[in-house]
Image: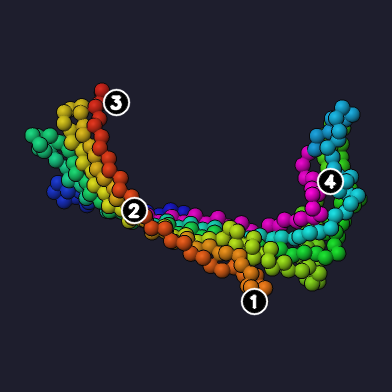
Amino acid sequence: SEQGHSVILLGGDYKIDAEVTYSNAPDREPVYSNYKFGQKYTVPGAYIINFSNLYPTWNITPFIATINPAIQGLRQDYVDNDEQLTTIKVDVQKDFDGWFGERSGFLKFGVKYSNRDRNDIRDSVIYTAPGYTLYDIDPGVASSGATSVLGGRYVIPVTLNSDVITQNYYALLAQGKLVYDEPDSLSNAGYDTYQVTEQVAAAYGMFSLNLTNKLILSGGFRDEMTHAPLTSVAYTTDPITGLATNTPVTVVSNYNEFLPNLQLRYELSKST
């Protein structure tokens, strides 16, 4: 969402333009799950090409169904991103009709301040399931088989049933059968978690002078001062207790930019 308010005040040859804007862009994702099974094994979930007898059949469904891989991890993530931007700007402009030998033009000076807040938070919870396999969270995989279409040219492999997996995941969790993996949970949560505030204060001035009806001289400057502290988390292990933790770490960036500008423009016609 975005909101803004602008006011123009006229006083003689001076024009004052004041503007305040605010925008908010939340991006929240509900809990979603990832499941990891035996190393180097992939659970197929898309079409797999099968060129009949001309080339090998790249369908690993029977392979997966045969080995019934152990569950290595059950992971849930919640992502909450939010960005808010507030800007305040004031311009003062004076127009001239008899400037430097009856030439027209204008002078403008202004200041602008912007404050941008962005928060990215990732909450990751990872469990291991000792003694449990793929069949325990989706029993249908054991009895289902691949489906051939177009005369065997394409094979639709066995896919996991997300509704069944989710139901069994919460059932195992309620029964206390899952083991919380604190180091992996904390390290993944801190991977994409940060908060940054960028504050920019700018002052600028510009002029425009019509040297002739077609030749225009313009220029100006802009000076920006930026203050941007960024806070994230560092995954560490306490050397005494051995406990895993995420420690806040802040890095501050301060810099200044001076941007001059000078232009000479010739208009070939009013349309250019």
Distance from Cα at disc 2 to Cα at disc 4: 58 Å
Q: Which mark is residue 271?
A: 3
Q: Which mark is residue 240?
A: 1
* Earlier sequence position, callout 3 versus callout 4: 4
Q: Position of residue 79 (x, y in %)?
A: 60, 59
In this rendering, the count of numbered labels is 4
Q: Position of residue 229 (x, y in %)?
A: 44, 61
Q: Secondary structure at mark 4?
A: loop
Q: What residue is shown at x 72% (from left), y 56% (from top)?
A: 34
Q: Position of residue 240 (x, y in %)?
A: 64, 76
Answer few, some or many: residues within 10 Å of disc 3's Cα (few below 14, many 20 plus, some between 14 and 19): few
Task: Give the extent of the magenta segment.
Answer: 20-47
Residue type at tag 4: Val
Distance from Cα at disc 4 to Cα at disc 1: 48 Å
In depth, the one of 248 and 73 nearer the eye is 248
**3 vs 2, front mark:** 2
Q: Are marks 3 and 4 in contact (CB under 8 Å)?
A: no
What is the magenta segment's predominant secondary structure?
strand
